[in-house]
Image (spheres, rainbow, N blue to C red):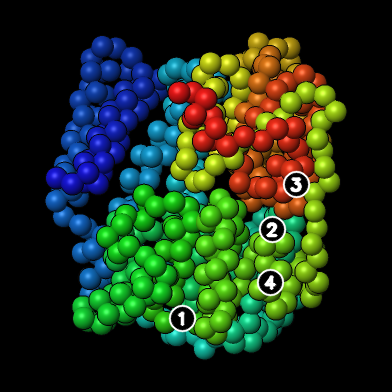
Amino acid sequence: MTRAKITIFKQYLLMALFVVLVRVIFRFIFGDRSFEGILQAGIDGFKLAVWVLGFGLLNVVVDFRKLLSRLPRSWRGLSVPLGIALSLTPELANSLNRIRENSKLRANRRGIRLIRSVLTPMLSGAIDQAIELADSMQARGFGKKLPSPSGEIKLAKLNFTYPSGREVLRDVSLKLELGSFTVVTGNTGSGKSTLLKVIQAKNPGVGFVGQLPRQTFVADTVFAELAFSLRQRGSSNAAITDRVSEVATTFGLDLEANPLELSAGWQQRVAIAAALTAGSKVLILDEPFSALDDSGTSELISTLSDLKASGTTIVVAEHRVNLLTGLADRVLQIRDGSLTESELEIQNLDHMIPNSGNVTVLFGPNGSGKTTYLKRLAKRSGALIPQPASDLLFLDSVEEEFKQADLDAKKPDGTTAAIAKKFALEFEPNQNPRDLSEGQKLTLALCVQLAKTTDLLLLDEPTLGFDLTSRQILADTIRQIAESGVEVIVATHDREFAGAIATETISIEQVSQNAR
């Protein structure tokens, strides 16, 4: 049995144990609390766990995802949910581990409070990931035959309104020429991702890569990931092998590698290659630089430069527009729902280096151990804001989060709310934390953790998905925290942000050497 298959079985084992635990606790809280009732709940949970484990064992032997990709086209619609579930299960187990650990950063809980603090963010994340995965599969032809777009993109007087009534896009018209490179900018929540999704929906067959490529992978080898779209088109095995080998050579990919085990930069490259394998001449990318270290950023810029030179039409939604000054032909800005031509302005953060106190920035490539180091520090002392910060949030309203944070910190009512007011967190009292923007979620998590008495604040990649304004507000917030006497350590790839806040910078290699 290979290492990858052993890992898959361990993940199913964890899910099976979790099924039993949930069944017993829910019976205790909502049902019969007698010994016989709890015993019956355990037996019922065990029966479900056996099914989970049996399916896990079968999944170790049989590659169901590969079989699904070869089903007759008439069956593909029925297999979409199963394909999503198969791809999500290992990631759900990983998410469960991560969220369980991150929930301890806020407070140690037991019973129903522990389950709620873990299940709420896990299920919320699972829904988001399922949507991302379904979009990725359908964009590559799963369940339907896709045309090959010509490379030109056109939209005329488009309007888009969410079910809540919020109008995101208003009277948007767009025409992109073959081989053009377009950057879409706008504040966080302005509608950039929505516009990209609409372009994808209106132009079936375009290559699309979302913000987190690892959430869109459907296979456990690079070869199978690249071959996915070709199998949906009914290509022969020989044609698939030839085309995949050609694309892998162009992108410098190891076809035997597991995409989930690659660095963020290489995952980005695999996702782009998979999006273009079927021959699309259009590539759409949503915040592609947000999770990349320096090496990954350089590799992606090089990849995009080569694609532009080959005549690929490229549309990129990005906050860090400074990275694309040498590639962009035009810049479009979304403001109040309207799309307008704009100049590619190089905008820099104002420096917010504290006059007193310490802000240390920790650098290191993806997978180098920065997150592990911060968690190790947090276990000894200090408050950690993990990535994603939403792992700390599990209640139904911001007000409830405030009240719970006061209880966890054993502070008077209103302590956390007062911190939020100081940091200008805007919200409605009954607003669900999961409906906040990423910047607001981070600020709320900051307030929750700062309600505790701590001398050390740790932040893990806090600027992912932040626009310039949000990064500036965060920089000012960190300055205020440092000047209040709290030591701050920030792990980030964002060199500009680091320059705006740091009193000291260190590398993870330096930390490792000092630990020896």
The residue to which callout 1 is attached is 280
The residue under the point 72% across, 30% down is 359
The residue under the point 28% across, 18% down is 38
Q: Position of residue 327 (x, y in %)?
A: 66, 73
Distance from the alpha carbon under mark 3 to that under mark 1: 35 Å
Q: Judge from the rendering whether residue 429 lies leftward or rightward of residue 176; answer left or right.
A: right
Say if mark 3 contacts mark 4, CB within 8 Å.
no
Sort mark 1 into few (<14), some (14-19) or many (20+) by Cα contacts within 10 Å.
many
The residue to which callout 2 is attached is 320
The residue to which callout 3 is attached is 470
Distance from the alpha carbon under mark 2 to that under mark 1: 26 Å
Sort mark 2 into few (<14), some (14-19) or many (20+) by Cα contacts within 10 Å.
many
Q: Secondary structure at mark 1?
A: loop
Q: Position of residue 166 (x, y in %)?
A: 72, 58
Q: Amino acid at mark 2?
A: Arg
Distance from the alpha carbon under mark 4 to that under mark 2: 13 Å
Total numbered labels placed on residues in the image: 4
